Amino acid sequence: MIRREQLPELRIFARAEKGLQLCTDSTFAALVVPNGNGSAAGHRWFKYKEAFSSELLSSVLARLRTDQSARAIRMLDPYCGVGTSLLSAQLLDAKIESFGIECNPFSAFVARTKLSWHLMDAVKIRWLAAKLLAQTHTGEIALPQLSSIASGRCITRHMARQIMQFRRALDTLPPSIEREALKLGLASVIEPVSRIRRDGRALRIVEKQRIVFREALANRWSTIADDVEVLQKAHRKPHPAKILIGDGRQPETVGIANGSIDLIVTSPPYPNNIDYNEVYKLELWFLGYAKTAEEFLALRRATFRSHPTCSPVVSQDDNLDEKFCQLLNNGPFAELMGTVIRRVEKIEKADRRGRSKVLLGYVHDTWKSLQAHYRSLRRGGRAIYVVGNSLHGGSENPYLVPTDLIFAKLAQGIGFKVEELIIARGLQRRLAGNHFLRDTVVVLRKN
């Protein structure tokens, strides 16, 4: 267990908290994780470990006292993942027009397919599923070039061939939203039939009980058809929702006009070293969104700089905005981040992992994102960020990254009012009783 005295930066964090409106609301503890998503119609079509709860949006609207009888709200999720916030918006009584931005093509496919439930024909899904399951697949089939698949390390070659046989059969069908639903069902069984379990930033090889592939696939397809009927019966006129492929750090590049958004609700990447393209690489490759090692690496490097494999990281002397360098070197933010960066630089002299460059890249991307999101919002609009503070460096050289304070202090410098930091839950794994290791909902308002 790490001791408090090993983290001298905590004194700086305490000073940074002064003047901020902090509150603890344990009702959000179940909302900042995918609680309930595994049983909610539509949301359960693909298990996304990093999602927040499908109930979060309704709780946020209630807390903000949003008038649900007023004009339609235009909501943006710039890091929408598999579209949890947008599907929730579709199903609420509040009039919400929602937009999601996602750079991972597989995640965007999942989100787009889920949001098309109102266009699907459940009878056709069942008919196509029965037709495909009745087929006998013969002949050789090429496996994706990813070594984790081709070698049989992460999934047996037998299972991999079955997945590719069904994907080939799906590709021969005429294009339709029902075909996309069946592809999503196929993607959703890849992890259960594989040898891996998603564990934070890694795929871990684990012992699993044997699963019959066709039975698992039939159950997933049946669940999707059942949910389509349930949703269409309960929601006659879903609110409009659109997925945009692009960079959440630059909403204007995908058509989000400045001053056009009333509400941002998102869980942005934070510096926990998770590369979501790596974590979901089996699905990316099996569905054909990555075909070569070069394509896959380019996708990983184009993401938010929260992990070591992102685009080339920076130093203060290289490729950083002058205003950002001033922010790092002077004023209250310099005190907050300077302490952490100096700790990290000292630690990396021993391990040479380039941690400080990753952290600098992350903070720079956060600053640019907050500026862009500020421009996207109308005056009086709010931005809600679900973030987690993280502990790094091991038991010998620990350091804590206060993501919620980074967001709050950067936002203040941009012009946001920090309305409140809602502490959802403490994270006690390696630092028992510490106030700063926590998940937080950061609530900002554009003045």
Image (cartoon, rainbow, N blue to C red):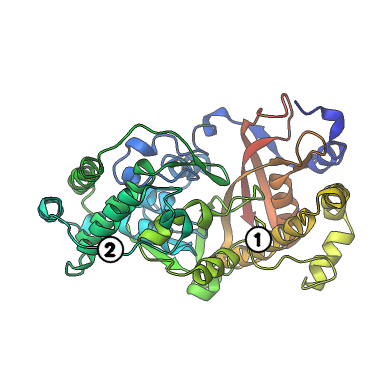
SS under mark 1: loop
Expressed as whole percent of the image width and height from the top left, the position of residue 254 reads 49, 73
Q: Quadrant of residue 23?
A: top right
332 left or right of 36? right
Task: Give the residue number, with chain letter if any, for mark 2.
Answer: 141
The crowding category of the residue bearing disc 1, from other C-alpha atoms within 10 Å (few below 14, some 14 to 19, many at least 20), is many
Residue 13 to residue 333: above or below: above
Q: Is residue 8 visible?
A: yes
Visible residue check, residue 71: no
**Callout 1, which amino acid?**
Arg
Residue at left offset 35%, top offset 61% = 143
Residue nearest the observer in this picture, 280 or 254? 280
**Residue type at numbered disc 2:** Ile
Element marked by disc 2: loop
In terms of depth relative to the viewer, which is nearer, 318 or 43? 318
Between the residue at mark 2 and the residue at mark 1, the CA separation in whole angstroms equals 37 Å
> Residue 384, percent across and down?
57, 50
Quarter occupied by residue 29: top right
Give the residue at mark 1: 305
Where does residue 139 sit, x and y in percent of width and height?
Answer: 20, 62
Q: Position of residue 46 (x, y in %)?
A: 36, 47
The residue under the point 49% across, 65% down is: 103
